[in-house]
Each structure stands twice: as C-alpha cells, then as structure tokens.
Amino acid sequence: MKSVGFKTSDYLRTKKDVVAYLNAALEDGEPAVLLEALRNVAQIRGGMGALAKAAGVNRESLYRTLSRRGNPKIETVMELIRALGLKFTVELRKAV
C-alpha cells in the first residue's frame, strides 16, 4: 500500500478553515505550534515573500521568526496576523 504525505494546505481551503486552524494552534499553548501554523498559512496565502511584504518585514527575517527556534516579539506576530487579514480576540474559557 502506497502512503501519501500529509500536506496541511490540502485542508485549509477556506478562510474559516484557516481561522479554526490558527485557533487550534493557539489553544495548544506551545509557541512553536503557532509559529508552524503561521508558516503553513503563509504558504497557502502566496508564500513567505508575500507575507513578508504585506507585513513590512524582511523575508529572511520572517523565515527566522517563524522557524522552530523563532522567538518573535508580540508586535511581529500581531503584524503577521494583520497582514493575513485576521485579528486576535480574547474570550472567556468555558468552565470545565
């Protein structure tokens, strides 16, 4: 049986899919998961170069920022979110 590689971009077809994906990454609580999710979204939204240009950051710097070892400032993450046409929101957690 031949296996097929998993590509996140195959599942992020709508804006709602992207929002749900990024929200799940935030819920995970690990910064590296959010950075990887932002990389994946950048790839389906025209690539890192397009996101860097829209966010007003250097492309090489963006690659470093969103790498597994990246440690971006909150301002940078917020600018990337804005450049993707999204916004951060805060809501109350549901009681467990």
Image (cartoon, grey):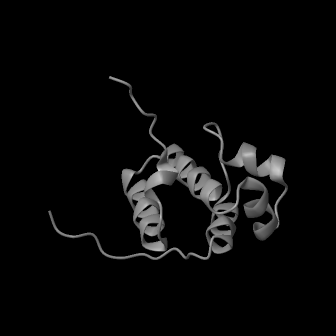
Front residue of this view, candidates 27 and 92: 27
**Residue 62 screen position, x and y as percent:** 75, 51
Front residue of this view, candidates 91 and 37: 37
- Above or below 65: residue 5: above
Q: Viewed as shown, does residue 43 lie left or right of 13?
A: right
**Residue in the picture at 49% in, 44% down:** 7
**Residue 19 screen position, x and y as percent:** 45, 68
Q: Viewed as shown, does residue 94 lie left or right of 53?
A: left
Residue 73 lies in quadrant: bottom right
**Residue in the picture at 69% in, 69% down:** 79
Front residue of this view, candidates 74 and 14: 14
- Above or below 62: residue 94: below
Front residue of this view, candidates 80 and 5: 5
Q: Residue furthest top?
A: 1
**Residue 89 screen position, x and y as percent:** 46, 77
- Above or below 73: residue 15: below
Residue 47 lies in quadrant: bottom right
**Residue 75 screen position, x and y as percent:** 68, 66
**Residue in the picture at 74% in, 43% down:** 64
Q: Quadrant of the C terminus?
A: bottom left
Q: Viewed as shown, does residue 71 lie left or right of 4?
A: right
- Above or below 8: residue 81: below
**Residue in the picture at 48% in, 49% down:** 8
